[in-house]
Image: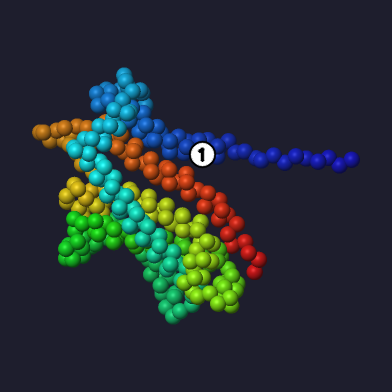
Amino acid sequence: MSSISVLRPRRSRVLTAIMSLYLIYTLAPLAWLVISSTKTQSDLLSTPGFALGGSFALFDNIIQTFTYNDGIYFRWLGNTLLYVVAGAGGATFLATVAGYGLAKYQFPGRKAVFAVILGAIAIPGTALAVPTFLLFSDLGLTNTPLAIIIPSLISPFGLYLIWIYAVDSVPDEMLEAARIDGAGEFRIFFQVALRQLMPGIVTVALFAVVSTWNNYFLPLIMLSEPKWYPLTVGLNQWNAQAQGAAARPVYNLVVTGSLLTIVPLVIAFLLLQRFWQSGLSAGSVKQ
């Protein structure tokens, strides 16, 4: 008689402990933010961070956040959405078109372009902030939405990601078959290749959206009028009100505004995660 052994997945206690600590490290700031948003200004300053306040003031804090200073939070939210739609959307489109072209077309200087892209990825954005400000200052574009949108259109990492993804996810045989059927290059891209690239496009879009939504340093040096601030700079301005002789601390509104800021990002991740699942089998076409 032959015995059949049931294989069970091996578990590492050390790895489980490390991942548990990482989970706590990740969720603890979010838990603090949610709990602190339910407190009044006095409770926020007098109670421990993870302890509940004397009263549940979440809805009152939300109302005050939207109405404080003539409802400027709505203006900052609209500015942020403008920068994300125009900047991150444009960056995703340009990265998709350029990455697909670099992956599927042969032309002189292609390797040089690849080297330039890798070099651009290695340069941190903060190192380019001051030169970008000086350039836009000479062009007279500072303190305008274009000062935030135009730099956001460039995403070397997004271009590189689409380039690498398109190599395997869009088979050359599929493109040749479309050409034989008489389809032009633009039609092939929009009706054939774009569907295969969708998981990669969504990944690039989410990276671009998060980067633009959380962008702080560039708007800080480019913008001087509060009416053009994004949420990151605007909330920091509220936080700075607690300093000086005429201090007007509104910490409860800063915390609540920060909580409201991350809600759209969470919704975006939940709605778009299915595109990653659909891309697990991308590139599995038999050559």
The local secondary structure at tag 1 comes to: helix
**Picture coordinates of residue 190 (x, y %)?**
48, 66
| Dot 1 amino acid type | Met
**Picture coordinates of residue 226 (x, y %)?**
19, 47
**Picture coordinates of residue 275 (x, y %)?**
52, 52
Tell me the residue at 32%/50% (across/down).
81
Tell me the residue at 50%/35% (across/down).
20
Residue 49: in sight, yes or no?
no
Q: Name which quarter of the figure residue 94 lies in.
A: bottom left
Q: Residues within 10 Å of mark 1 (few under 14, many from 20)?
A: few
Q: Nearer the viewer, residue 188 or 129?
A: 188
Q: What is the quadrant of the C terminus in the image?
A: bottom right
Residue farthest to the top?
54
**58 to 111, vertically: above or below:** above
Q: Nearer the viewer, residue 10 or 235?
A: 235
Q: Nearer the viewer, residue 273 or 74?
A: 74
**28 to 283, vertically: above or below:** above
**110 to 164, vertically: above or below:** below
Numbered disc total? 1
Tell me the residue at 38%/35% (across/down).
29
Residue 77: in sight, yes or no?
yes
Q: Is residue 47 left or right of residue 191?
A: left
The residue carrying mark 1 is: 19
Q: Is residue 156 left or right of residue 139?
A: right
**Picture coordinates of residue 167 (x, y %)?**
53, 67
